[in-house]
């Protein structure tokens, strides 16, 4: 579970990260990452739309993504914000496959964000 200090909650923070951050796509997720020089804790938010499935499926996907991100928080620089958007194919994947996709997209998004 993500600690409260690492959760992205405000709509404007989601919008700012998606618009100003760098994006990378994998088979089941799109990761938007924005890096700042701020020393505050990194924050992560999740978007799982109706295209992924019904309410039970969406919540299951969101829980899996949250669990996968909690184990990767030490890889995210302080002051960064990350938005993870699940794609429709995420519902049928195992947690391991979803974690591999997430890691690929996360690495790629931060590489792009640092090169800006």
Image (cartoon, grey):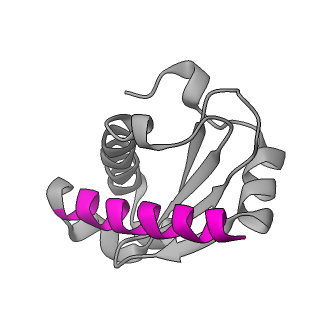
Question: The C terminus is located in which quarter?
Answer: bottom right
Q: Quadrant of residue 26?
A: bottom left
Taking the image as drawn, is residue 31 in sight?
no
**Left of 102 or right of it: where is 46?**
right
Rendering coords of residue 80 (x, y %): 65, 44
Q: How many marks?
A: 0
Q: Quadrant of residue 86?
A: bottom left
User: Was residue 46 drawn as part of the magenta stretch in this picture?
Assistant: no
**Left of 86 or right of it: where is 18?**
right
First to last magenta residue range: 97-116
Query: Seen from this angle, which residue lies furthest front?
Result: 115
Rendering coords of residue 60 (x, y %): 31, 48
| Above or below for 38 versus 60 | above
Taking the image as drawn, is residue 11 in sight?
yes
Question: The N terminus is located in which quarter?
Answer: top left
Rendering coords of residue 41 (x, y %): 62, 28
> In percent of the image, x 16 and y 57: which residue is there?
96
Query: In front: 62, or 76?
Result: 76
């Amino acid at each position: 579970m993500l600690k409260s200090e690492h959760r992205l909650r405000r709509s404007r923070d989601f919008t700012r990260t998606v618009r100003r951050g760098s994006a990378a796509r994998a088979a089941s997720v799109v990761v938007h990452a924005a890096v700042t020089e701020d020393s505050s804790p990194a924050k992560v938010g999740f978007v799982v739309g109706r295209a992924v499935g019904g309410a039970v499926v969406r919540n299951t996907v969101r829980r899996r993504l949250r669990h996968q991100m909690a184990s990767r928080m030490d890889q995210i620089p302080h002051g960064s914000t990350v938005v993870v958007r699940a794609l429709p194919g995420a519902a049928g994947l195992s947690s391991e496959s979803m974690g591999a996709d997430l890691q690929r997209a996360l690495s790629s998004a931060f590489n792009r964000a640092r090169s800006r």
